[in-house]
Amino acid sequence: MLGRLGRKHVEIAASFASTAVGFGGAAFVTLLYFTDWKVFVANIPFYRGKFKEVEEK
């Protein structure tokens, strides 16, 4: 199958690369929205302190 792919096919795929990146980014942001976003945001250095839980004694 790979032998049938030529320069034209590579050019067509390259023209859709920016669109694919855009849709992939939108899908990732949507995934973050519908999942527990604190898990992801807690790994950002300056936001990490925002979610520290206070231990009560």
Image: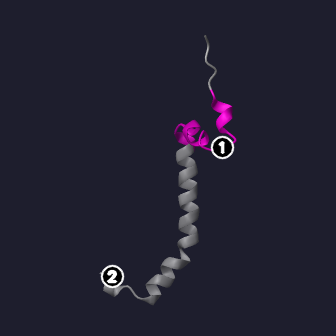
Cα distance between the residues tagged 1 and 2: 44 Å
- Let me know if residue 46 is in the magenta part: yes
Image position, residue 24 (x, y; %): 53, 59
Decide which of 16, 40 is in the foreground and name it: 40
Q: In this view, does 27 lie above or below 56?
A: below
Q: Earlier in the sequence, mark 1 or mark 2?
A: 2
Q: Residue at x 55, y 78 (%)?
A: 15
Q: Which residue is drawn at 32% across and 86% down?
A: 3
Quadrant of the rendering where the C terminus is positioned: top right
In the depicted structure, whether residue 3 falls above or below residue 19: below
User: Which region shows up in magenta?
Assistant: 33-52
Residue shown at the point (53%, 37%) measured from the top left: 36
Amino acid carrying label 2: it is: Leu
Please tell me the numbered disc located at residue 2: 2
Q: Are marks 1 and 2 in contact (CB under 8 Å)?
A: no
Q: Which residue lies furthest to the front in this view?
A: 57
From the image, tell me which residue sits under label 1. Answer: 45
Label disc, if present, on residue 25 of the rendered structure: none
Three-letter code for the amino acid on which mark 1 is drawn: Pro
